[in-house]
Amino acid sequence: MLALVLMLAACGAPSAAPSATDAAPAEQPATSGGEAAAATPTVAADTAMSDTEAVQSSPAAQGGVTGSIAVTSTEDVSTPRTNIGGEFRSSSTSDFVSFQPYLTTDTGSSGAQANVYEDSLLTLDENTLQYKPFLARSYEVSEDNLTYTFHLDPNAKWSDGVPLTANDFQWTYDQVIKPENEYPYLSSLDVISTYVALDDHTLQVTLDEVYCPALTTVSAGITPLPEHIWKDLSWSDPEKNPEINKPTVTSGPYKLSEWKRDQYSQYVANPDYWYHGAPNITTQTDEIVPDSDVSFQKMKSGDTDTGEITPENLAEARTFDNINIYEWWPAAAQWSYVGMNLRTAGKPTTDINVRHGISYAIDKDVMVDEIMEGLAKRQCSVYPDTSWAYNPDVECYNYNAEQAKAEFAKSGYTYDESTATMMTPDGQPLTLKLVFGPNTNKTREQLALSIQGNLADIGIKVEIQALEWSSFLDAIQTTSDPDWDLYLGGWSSTIEPQFMEQIWSKENIPDLNSAGYVNETVEQDFKDAGQNSDVDYRKQKFGEIQKIIADDSPYVFLFYRKAWAGYNKRVAGIEPAPLGIGYNQLDWYITDAP
């Protein structure tokens, strides 16, 4: 699919929220007219694309604005695109969950939703990462930074011709904040006091107290749904609301043509799209295939315009005459980890010494060098070294099998030399269950096998269960006590470090905080950082958070990875920038289109 963005690891949350990703090395950028302010890939290409200074000094990274501002766009959004036509073909190894933006956390669903629903009032400049108007053609921020007023494009409309108004935003917000509607990222909206349509084209959002990255939250926190269609339908039951899986009234650059779950999805350009009219590419088709090898071969043969490229296949892909390869280090890091079960009483992983032992036992350097082929870098806590909030002074748990055994010994475990078995305090061999998904992801499979081997070296048997994507999400997000001990996960993080608080919040167990980690000091530090605009103070708080979480070890932090993507050379208009390659995707075109 031309439109896959980043979220809970399957190929997914709104742009001001971290999203879970799978360990697949390449993510397709979002098919949206604007680039969301937080969770999108950045830097792209074969040239030197990683503009770390632009990322770190941008409002998106350091919390937006202070003092009053008024911004008005002078761009003429009525001028049509001129390279219309053609079909973009892609393949994926797992399907998305649904088109309901407020019930999903996976990247696949986020991408599908970005195709059909407009999702951001503001966007980021692809070079400076400064905020600029998008669906809101102008906006103002009050002197006290508590009131944000947005003026919507008066020509925006739903695909049935009904105007898209501020009332749709307010109605959607009113539904989202209802606890019974169970929005996974609801805590991200806690800073909002009022969210009101002043008239059809004016939306005003107020806060009770200053929140440093508020501009991102209020501009990207709500994807409007059509009130005139949804108001009498179920919010969550697709049997009572067909719009959840087959949306017929949409606002995005594309309209759904057909979706056959686990087979394919197809989209056609929206001729009435408000931003420069229909996108250049007329049709998108994404086929679900058995595994990444099939996806790769389809790209190689020209059957599709892009495909999944695993780390071991990237060198070969660079040699293809028909493919352009783009590589970049994302501003919003995509990182992998092992989550530990802190939710089920009696599980070995509820013991901090066990967690430390597992952390020392896993050889992260081998994963980086051999499984990721050097296309990743070690990460030791919440933020990678590309973030301005990065704290280098945290425990990294470098591979040390003997130290791992010593950590287990602190809690009464013994290593039986004669049988090479780790024995529990009550004298039983220690066995752990590791789950991962999707089961088609070969990189995740290799990581699971590496963990299994590492833990076997200190006498621990690991049973691996590979699950289909939706089953994996069900397993880690179950509201009952999980039966697994460990799971392999990935996050596509946010440029602004504040928003990562959501995955560590007690309130977000189990949807985002599947491990079940609870630390009141961490939550208070996040709150303090959000209420202060002083960068040094915020960096201190984020540094404390990284140290506490590294010490508590609810995760084994593995690595963050480079991003890469391959596209058939018939796909033109891709222009790498510090923000990545997806920011102008609606302007991409097919050179051999009829």
Image: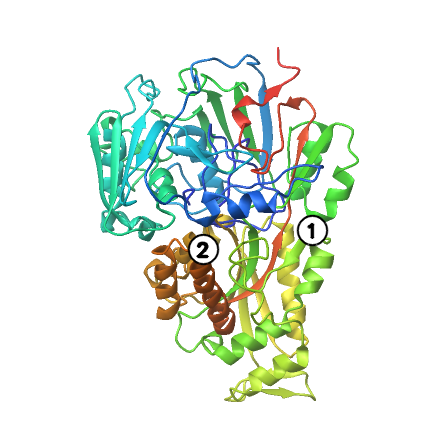
Labelled disc at residue 375: 1
Please tell me in which quadrant of the rendered image residue 428 appears: bottom right
For badge 2, the amino acid type reads Val
Q: How is the image coloured?
A: rainbow
Q: Around disc 2, counting alpha carbons within 10 Å, would you say few (fewer than 14), some (14 to 19), or many (20 or more)?
A: some
The residue where tag 2 is placed is: 535
Q: At numbered mark 2, what does the secondary structure look like: helix, strand or loop? A: helix
For badge 1, the amino acid type reads Leu
Query: 396 or 403, which lies in front?
Result: 396
Q: Residue at the spot x=67%, y=36% of the render?
A: 45
Query: 567 or 580, which lies in front?
Result: 580
Query: 67 or 237, which lies in front?
Result: 67
Query: 231 or 278, which lies in front?
Result: 278
Q: Residue furthest top?
A: 594
Question: Quick check: marks 2 and 1 in contact, CB under 8 Å?
Answer: no
Pick whichever of labels 2 and 1 is earlier in the sequence: 1
